[in-house]
Image (cartoon, rainbow, N blue to C red):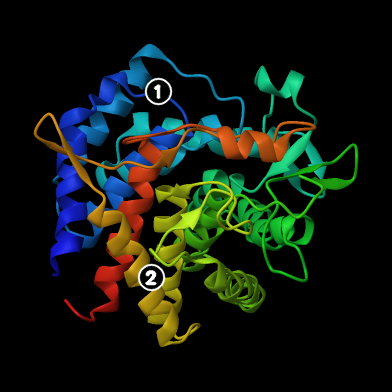
Amino acid sequence: MNKNIQKIFALADDSVIRKVPEQLNWSWGQALFLYALSRIDTEFCSDKYSDYIRRFYDHYTEKGYRLCSSDTSAPALGALYLAQKTGEQRYWDVVNAVREYYANAPRILGDMPNHHGTAIEGRLYPKSIWIDSIMMYGVFTNWLAQATGDSQLQAFAAKQPAAFAQHLQDPETGFFYHSYWTNFKTHYPKQPIFWGRGNGWVMASIPLLMQYLPEEEQPQVKAIFTHLAESLLPYQREDGYFETVFNRPGETYKEASATMLIASGWFYGYRTGLLGREYYDAAVKAFNAVCDDLQVKDGLLSMPYISAPTSAIQCIPYFVYKHTPRGNDWPYGLAGAFFAALEYLRCGEDQ
């Protein structure tokens, strides 16, 4: 195992020291952090992080949690991991609650629910689907459908990747827009402004859900993935990073979560034969760039240059992307780094 992969796994160890699980919010970023830790445990057949993950879910199963949107459904990922691992009903209860949420959530576009659901944000933002949701519920629903043999859920889950692509993927460039507003029948932003982390979610989530997809759905989803993966390559910066608006190089700022998520997809594409060697080399360059920028804060490794939660705000989307601040150790950014390290490790080269 090379030193930078080791460095990211050391970052995982330090992150669970820095972040108290009972103090993590019941939301998407924290959910992906926990899910990524579970993937590390699964990869190494270990229980290194299991008690940490359990503490989060035990806290919220006692305290209660609100399930009202794609973002608040994302903790189902870690709950399903624990439910399968332990068989305990309290974790299955979380899984089943999210299953029921998607069974009953009103559809706004084909078989797709509103990203904001009944959350307060949904009263302020147009009814819409967001590219984030391919990670927030696309991975979980496909995983649960395969695990349980739930044919109704499988019918819903299997069509989601192609549905996101139909409404959000630009057919010429292969890039994904942030959202699609159903009442206005248009993607948003309307201009060709492409958000780095959103496209990173596609690059990372398709490898995570591909193993659960029915065989007949896989060729179309692989084509969606390779189109995006190939289109991204010319926009990688010389230093290995991607910018937060990656198709306007030099105008915004380098962003670590998008860079690691894209790298994880490139590693997967190379490993599975969907992409050539140049994508592996580009992924290594991206991975190393972020690793080289890791800092030490209070004696613990810390990941900088992660943009804060980001929305496509009406009328001023580019301004918002450009001026969303960056910080250290946002949990979804850490998750992206863990996904990339695992995919790099699986490639088995230069280890």
Q: Is residue 78 visible?
A: no
Task: Classify 10 Å Cα crowding around label 1: few (below 14), some (14-19), many (20 and above).
Answer: some
Tell me which label, 1 or 2, sits earlier in the chain.
1
Closer to the camera, 82 or 202?
202
Closer to the camera, 327 or 35?
327
- Residue 97 numbered tag: none
Q: If the image is split into quadrants, where does the N terminus sit?
A: bottom left
| The quarter of the displayed image where residue 125 is located | top right
What residue is rendered at 55% in x and 52% in y? 196
The residue that mark 1 highlights is 25
Q: Is residue 42 visible?
A: yes
| The quarter of the displayed image where residue 16 is located | top left
Secondary element type, mark 2: helix
Secondary element type, mark 1: loop
- Residue 283 numbered tag: 2
Q: Is residue 176 left or right of residue 323?
A: right
Closer to the camera, 266 or 56?
266
Q: Is residue 214 left or right of residue 115?
A: left
Q: Check the image and report above or below for 309 versus 32.
A: above
Task: Classify 10 Å Cα crowding around label 2: few (below 14), some (14-19), many (20 and above).
Answer: many
| The quarter of the displayed image where residue 34 is located | top left
Amino acid on which the number 2 mark rests in the picture: Ala
Q: Check the image and report above or below for 121 versus 109.
A: above
Q: Position of residue 118 (x, y in %)?
A: 69, 22
Q: Check the image and report above or below for 287 versus 111.
A: below
